[in-house]
Image: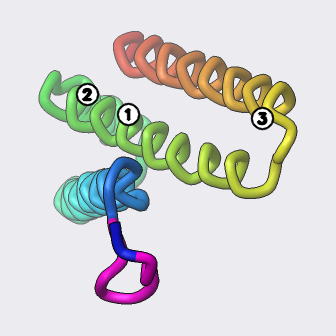
Amino acid sequence: MSTNNIGPKRLVVGAHYGLKEWIIQRITAVVMVVFTVVLLVAYLIAGGASYEAWAGLFSNQLMKLLTFLTFLSLFYHAWIGIRDIWMDYIKPVGIRLTLQTLTVLWLVACAAYAAEILWKV
């Protein structure tokens, strides 16, 4: 193994330095942008923001699925960011694990609540 582990000759094995998470955050961001564009176009076509227009838009199963996919993307995007914050700034392992567990539980609860709201409409 080389003693020079700096620069282009650095041995990058194992952790991959967050590449997978970086790619996932970019993909989830694209999903959220696509949803925003679809929602904006639907708003402009509907011609207003009345309750009937929004209820009609979200009564479509495809729109419910796209919205739920966007929420899941948002929650996963947030998980990666918050997890990195906990890993970078909380050094005691017990506290970090507790915060990560509470974060996951909160995001899963938010996803369940989003599903409940979407399929009540």
- From the image, tell me which residue sits under label 2: 64
Left or right: 118 with respect to 82? left
Q: Position of residue 115 (x, y in %)?
A: 41, 17
Q: Nearer the viewer, mark 2 or mark 3?
A: 3
- In depth, the one of 50 and 105 nearer the eye is 105
Asked if one can make out residue 21 in the rendered structure from this viewpoint, the answer is yes
Chain part drawn in magenta:
3-11
- Image quadrant occupied by the C terminus: top left
Residue at position x 79%, y 32% in the image: 93
- From the image, tell me which residue sits under label 3: 96
What is the secondary structure assignment of the residue under circle 1? helix
Give the amino acid type for the residue marked by disc 1 in the picture: Leu
Residue 33 is labelled as none
Q: Position of residue 82 (x, y in %)?
A: 64, 47
Asked if one can make out residue 36 in the rendered structure from this viewpoint, the answer is no
- In depth, the one of 114 and 26 nearer the eye is 26
Q: Does the stretch in magenta take in 6?
A: yes
What is the secondary structure assignment of the residue under circle 3? helix
Residue at position x 16%, y 22% in the image: 61
Left or right: 50 with respect to 28? right
Residue 72 is labelled as 1
Q: Position of residue 54 (x, y in %)?
A: 35, 39
Q: Nearer the viewer, mark 1 or mark 2?
A: 1
Give the amino acid type for the residue marked by disc 2 in the picture: Lys
The answer for how far apart the CA atoms under marks 2 and 3 are is 35 Å
